[in-house]
Image (spheres, rainbow, N blue to C red):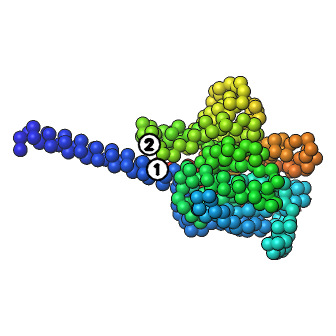
Amino acid sequence: MGLLDLVQWVVQGTVYVGLTAVTGGLFLLYFYQNNLIYPAHFPPGSRQSVSKPDEFNLNDYEDVTITTPDNVKIKAFLIRRPKGTTEQENETVDFATALRDGVRKRGPEKQDAEELAEYTLIYCHANAGNMGHRLPIAKVFHSRCNANVVMFSYRGYGQSEGSPSEAGLKIDAQATLDWVLAHPQLRNTKIVVYGQSLGGAVAIHLASTNEDKIAGLIVENTFLSLPKVVPHILPYLKYLTFLCTQVWDSETTIQRIPRLPILLLSGGKDELIPPSQMAGLCYAARSARGKTKAPSTSTVKRDEHGIRFIVFPNGTHNETCVQRGYFDEVLAFWRECIVGDGSQSKSGETLVPKDVSNVDGVLEAYKTIEKGGEGSRLVTGGLGVPRM
Ligand SMILES: *[C@@H]1O[C@H](CO)[C@@H](O)[C@H](O)[C@H]1NC(C)=O
Ligand SMILES: *[C@@H]1O[C@H](CO)[C@@H](O)[C@H](O)[C@H]1NC(C)=O
Ligand SMILES: *[C@@H]1O[C@H](CO)[C@@H](O)[C@H](O)[C@H]1NC(C)=O
């Protein structure tokens, strides 16, 4: 073999191997991106075991199966909040409620007759784990916001059937809202939709197509769109975002919510989704409602056009919700924007305990789960994309 032949052979081989690697990479990226975007198997065990509300002393609950219009059975919890438990000022009272609920074992007919609190939170979880991992957070909404909580595991998550996709998750969220709207005790409650990280995109979409049916939207540490956030998470994919079949274009969608009160909660130290994306969402939503200034990263007005923007300076991607003051802000928003039409201002006064800065309930629960090891870790946010 001549030298030239050898060079040619090496070059050809390299090109060949390179092309194979690139095509293989593209192929993998194209077909397996759902596994990256929707890590439903993480933490390990997430598809097998889902914590139940009573593990957190939320004893008045129902294990629900919702069949979506495309015939996928997804799992949900309805955590009931009996009416008349509004004047609860501290966890001791909560404990008494929990005890009472534990003792009061009633049949389904009797439960149907029970009057429930007039607020319902629909919880859209982030992209790892399942709904059970978020129970400690649900518990705080339940007791502090005086709300029934409906949480669901997306298709392909927890013990829900199917496999996740953007179209599928949107159907699941709609099916859950429709289930609430058909529920005899929940359908006349004020519905607030809450989503963290990827769940924020789910929540924004749900709110945009159901604005007249809900009372508020709360999102935390979510992104403008997947093509805009992927380059920050996986920089080497910068030029390949055109391959994203999953888009979640919240930047556009949030502009289709012209009136609903919106609360945007942003962790200033979010290491996964740059906090500027939350500021960008705020800007998109506000500019659709009227004149507003483009945010310079550090200064976004707190309130404008019915949209509230709050930064927790020390909040990382998955621990913003345990920052001091997080639930103060949630409750202030709840009181002013969800309860807050004059007719209900009286209950508004007592709805929110005066000292709400104590999030120890969450922290305690978090520590307990943390001790349970890897498989039972609290997964709050977490886009969960493996850093390869
Ligand atoms: C909180 O719990 C304590 C301890 O049981 C109780 O004595 C107190 O009345 C409660 N505080 C309020 C404001 O309800
Ligand atoms: C953020 O963390 C720093 C350092 O631990 C602390 O001094 C500061 O009070 C925290 N800020 C807030 C708003 O929690
Ligand atoms: C959040 O993420 C950090 C670092 O990525 C991790 O150490 C921590 O355990 C996570 N916390 C929770 C609540 O999952």
> The residue tagged with tag 2: helix, strand or loop?
helix
The residue under label 2 is which amino acid type? Leu
Q: Residue at x 10, y 40 (%)?
A: 5
341 lies above or below 130: above
Residue 228: % across, % down: 53, 37
Q: Amino acid at mark 1?
A: Gln
Position of the N terminus, as image quadrant, is top left
Q: Residue at x 81, y 45 (%)?
A: 338
Instruction: Classify residue 351 as left or right of residue 245.
Output: right
Q: Residue 352's x, y, as percent?
A: 86, 49
Camera-side residue of 190 and 301: 190
* The residue at label 2 has a CB less than 8 Å from ligand 3: no
Q: Quadrant of residue 377?
A: bottom right
Q: Secondary structure at mark 1?
A: helix
Examine the rendered structure and indicate whether residue 301 appears above or below residue 329.
above
Ligand 3 within 8 A of label 1's CB?
no
Q: Are marks 1 and 2 in contact (CB under 8 Å)?
A: yes
Which numbered disc, 1 or 2, marks the residue that appears first in the sequence?
A: 1
For residue 139, side relative to residue 18 (left or right): right
Quadrant of res 362: bottom right
> Residue 232 vs residue 204: left or right?
left
The answer to whether residue 289 shows anywhere in this view is yes
Front in this rendered view, residue 248 or 278: 248
The residue identified by callout 2 is 243
Along the line of sight, the residue nearer the viewer: 122 or 232 = 122
Q: Report whether residue 363 is seen.
A: no
Which disc is residue 33 wearing? 1
Image coordinates for residue 91, horizontal then vertical, percent: 83, 59
Residue at the image point whose x is 28% and y is 44% from the top: 18
Which class describes the residues within 10 Å of circle 2: few (<14), some (14-19), or many (20+)? some
Q: Which mark is residue 284?
A: none
